[in-house]
Amino acid sequence: RAMHVAVYPGSFDPLTNGHLDIIRRGTRLFDRMLVAVLENEGKSPLFTVAERVDLISRCTESIPGVEVHSFSGLLVDFMRNRRRTVR
C-alpha cells in the first residue's frame, strides 16, 4: 500500500484553532501530514519561525502522523527535498 502524504503550508502566525482543525481532519484522510511553516523575510512576524515550529509541534504532539518543518522559497522546492528523504 502506498503511503499518502499531505502538505499543509502556511505562515501560521499565529497558529489558530482553525489551523489545528485542518491538521486533525487531514490526519484522518492521510497517513502523514507535513505542516510546512513558511519563512517569509518580507513580513514582520509576530513569532519567529522557530517559535512557530515549536508551538505547532507541541500542539500536535498527541496527533499521530504530524510532522512540522520550516521552509523558505518555493513550496515545490521544499517538496522536492522532502521527497528525497521520504521513501
Image (spheres, rainbow, N blue to C red):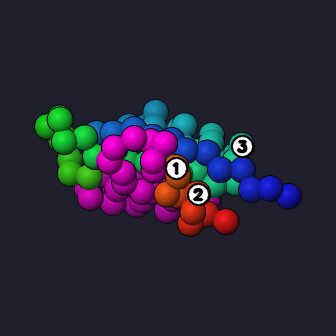
Q: Which residue, given by chain and number where applicable, does mark 1 sit on?
A: 79
Between circles 3 and 2, the one closer to the viewer is: 2
Q: Position of residue 69 (x, y in %)?
A: 42, 57
For the point 80% across and 56% down, the residue is 2
Q: Position of residue 32 (x, y in %)?
A: 63, 55
Task: Report the amino acid beneath label 2.
Answer: Arg
Range of residues picked out in magenta: 50-78
Residue 86 visible in the current orientation: yes
- SS class of the residue under badge 3? helix
- In the image, taking residue 81 as reference, residue 12 lies left or right, namely left
Q: Between 74 and 70, which is closer to the camera in this rendering?
A: 74
Task: Report the amino acid beneath label 3.
Answer: Leu
Give the position of the N terminus as an image quadrant: bottom right
Q: Which residue, given by chain and number where applicable, does mark 3 sit on?
A: 29
For the point 53% across and 38% down, the residue is 21
Q: Which residue, given by chain and number where applicable, does mark 2 sit on?
A: 83
Give the position of the C terminus as an image quadrant: bottom right
Q: Earlier in the sequence, mark 1 or mark 3?
A: 3
- SS class of the residue under badge 2? helix
Q: In the image, is residue 65 part of the stretch drawn in magenta?
A: yes
Q: In the image, is residue 67 part of the stretch drawn in magenta?
A: yes
- Quadrant in the picture for residue 3: bottom right
- In the image, taking residue 11 as reference, residue 21 lies left or right, namely right
Q: Position of residue 13 (x, y in %)?
A: 28, 39
- In the image, taking residue 80 as reference, residue 58 lies left or right, namely left
For the point 56% across and 66% down, the residue is 85
- SS class of the residue under badge 1? helix
Q: Is residue 15 above or below residue 33?
A: above
Task: Report the amino acid beneath label 1.
Answer: Met
For the point 61% across and 63% down, the residue is 86
- Pointer 3 local density, CA inside 10 Å: few below 14, some 14–19, many at least 20: few
